[in-house]
Amino acid sequence: MNILEGESKLLSPYYEKIVSDLADEAAHYDETSWKTKSMGDTVSEGNYCWVKVGVDSNKQLMWFGKSRGKQVAEDLRGKKANSKGVSDDYGAYKNMFDFHQLCWAHPHRKLRDLAQSSELTPEKLKICIKAYKDFKKVYSDAEKLKKQLLVTGFNGEKEHKELENRFLEITTPNRQDPEKLKTIRKRLKERKDRYFTFIQYPELPLDNNKAERKIRKIVLKRKKSFGSRSQKGADTLSILYSVILTMTEENPTKNFFELYKEAATLGKVN
């Protein structure tokens, strides 16, 4: 057993507490590639890293060396009853939560990129620019309505209906639309209800930025390490990253070594 593996075993009780705490909390989800090699008789479980981070806390789980399948996403979520999740519209998240808020920022970026495309004719580009501006305005108004619901507690039924009608209008494909725009509009319209979950639960963010910021840390790590050399190494990394990032971001003013000692002590007690 190497030093990092030994430390991960010591921190396992703290890690299991994070798993338990996050099971009862609304959370952000995201995933990115993470190459994990097979070694000897140990076969890699997959080449992805999944991230789960609390909406109202900085508790986080990072699972390295996993597949991109739906079962991994469900295992990361834990119990489904009353589960609340914020994510992009990747298929593995479909029907995974009792209350699912889809990220508005994701289609917003797709529409922005399409509106800046150099591959479209002037006529098609004009259509895409209008679609982007229309969605940007609805997104902005959704943020304003969410804040009103959260701060004042008013039901916003009239505003909600008006916003949904505008959303439906701008997500209905037109014959003149370029194919990429038709696809974006179609996906938005099919998932409309999940973009408006915040009406019932205004505490849920309209973007998945919190998880995406965690993913950036994984990307930086990946550029330096090129992944994990074994599944055991990926599992060790999962515990170390989850525990260290949780304890430091939950307690940003405390000394790292004091925090680490507290986390390790939990392992010794158990």
Image (tube, rainbow, N blue to C red):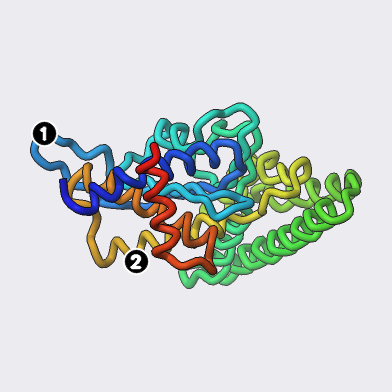
Categorize mark 2 by other alpha carbons within 10 Å: few (<14), some (14-19), many (20+).
Answer: few
The structure residue drawn at horizontal position 24% and vertical position 47%, both measured from the top left corner, is: 6
The structure residue drawn at horizontal position 54% and vertical position 40%, both measured from the top left corner, is: 21
Dot 1 corresponds to which residue?
41
Extreme left residue here? 40
For the residue labelled by badge 2, is the local secondary structure a helix, a strand or a loop? helix
Res. 251 in view: yes
Earlier in the chain: of badge 2 and badge 1, it is 1
Give the number of the disc on residue 220: 2
The structure residue drawn at horizontal position 68% and vertical position 49%, both measured from the top left corner, is: 204
Q: CA distance from mark 2 to mark 1?
A: 30 Å
Q: Quadrant of the C terminus?
A: top left
**Residue 160 locus on image (x, y percent):** 83, 47
Res. 48 in view: no
**Residue 209 locus on image (x, y percent):** 56, 59
For the residue labelled by badge 1, is the local secondary structure a helix, a strand or a loop? loop
**Residue 247 locus on image (x, y percent):** 47, 56
- Residue 187 or 67: which is nearer the viewer? 67
Q: What's under tag 2, amino acid-wise?
A: Leu
